[in-house]
Amino acid sequence: MQITDIRIYKTTLRNKYKQMRRDMPPSVKVQHDDSIRRRVQSLYQYKNAKTLLTFVSTDIEVDTRILIADALKNGKRVAVPRCIDGTREMEFYLIKSLDDLAPRTFGVLEPDPERSELLTDFSDSICIVPGLAFDFAGYRLGYGKGYYDRFLSRYPQTKVGIVYSSCMTQRLQHGRYDVAVDLLVTERYLRKVNSPSRFSQRR
């Protein structure tokens, strides 16, 4: 299919995948979220990481709040993003609990810099990446603001996209500055990007 206007193409896809997520029965979402979380926690990259970088999920996203709570309980450092005012950049701050968060940019929970520590050393970390959809090459359909692509272009460690299998697609149109993740995790499988075959831990 020839794309004449990438903006219309992406807006149409965003509306499609947002609606698919809204239509997911709550009980199914809970099951899928739990499967995805367990698969993330089974990754050796996750087990070996001392610091977890992750977004704080909204209602239509794969839940990350239990993942955050589990990581903190098990002694990992957890850092979540905060958008920098007047830019399309974001920084990650270390938190001690979900109580360190408050609604801010686009209504998303973000850390309070007065209660949190700015993370500057990304060694021994892993980053959980959100997306409305992903393709099999690891490229994502985000919300269109570019915050994550800017950050990921400088992030040297493992990038893990988490997404429902119904929001996976064969190929997404992407630009030269879009950044692919290294691993994809759905409720059905784990996929190493650029690998000809899937490796899975089905349960």
Image (cartoon, rainbow, N blue to C red):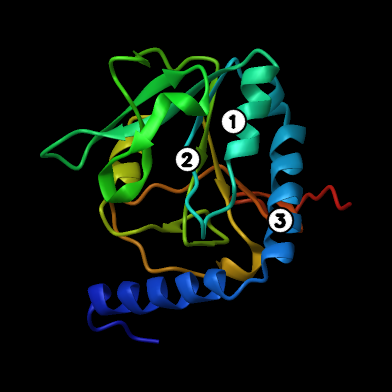
Residue sticking out furthest to the bottom: 1
> Could you say whether the residue bearing mark 1 is in a helix, strand or loop?
helix
Q: Is residue 145 left or right of residue 108?
A: left
The Cα–Cα distance between marks 1 and 3, rounded to whole angstroms, is 16 Å
Image x and y of residue 34, in percent: 74, 48
Around disc 3, counting alpha carbons within 10 Å, would you say few (fewer than 14), some (14 to 19), or many (20 or more)? some
Camera-side residue of 190 and 20: 20
Q: Position of residue 193 (x, y in %)?
A: 60, 49
Residue identified by numbered label 3? 30
**Circle 2 sits on which residue?**
56
Tell me what residue is drawn at x 69 percent, y 39 percent. Answer: 40
Q: Position of residue 64 (x, y in %)?
A: 58, 41
Q: Residue at x 30, y 82 (%)?
A: 3
- Marker count (numbered): 3
Locate the N terminus by quadrant: bottom left
Q: Name the outermost residue toward the right.
A: 203
Kindly identify which residue carries mark 1. Answer: 68
Q: CA distance from mark 2 to mark 3?
A: 16 Å
For residue 75, above or below residue 97: above
| Secondary-structure class at tag 3 | helix
Residue type at mark 1: give it: Ile
Query: Taking 82 as reference, is 169 above or below it?
Result: below
Q: Which is more N-terminal, label 3 or label 1?
A: 3
Left or right: where 179 falls relative to 138: left
Label pair 2/1, CB-CB below 8 angstroms: yes
- Tell me which amino acid carries mark 3: Val
Residue at the spot 20% in from the left edge and 33% down from the top edge: 84
Vertical side of 7 occupied by 80: above or below: above
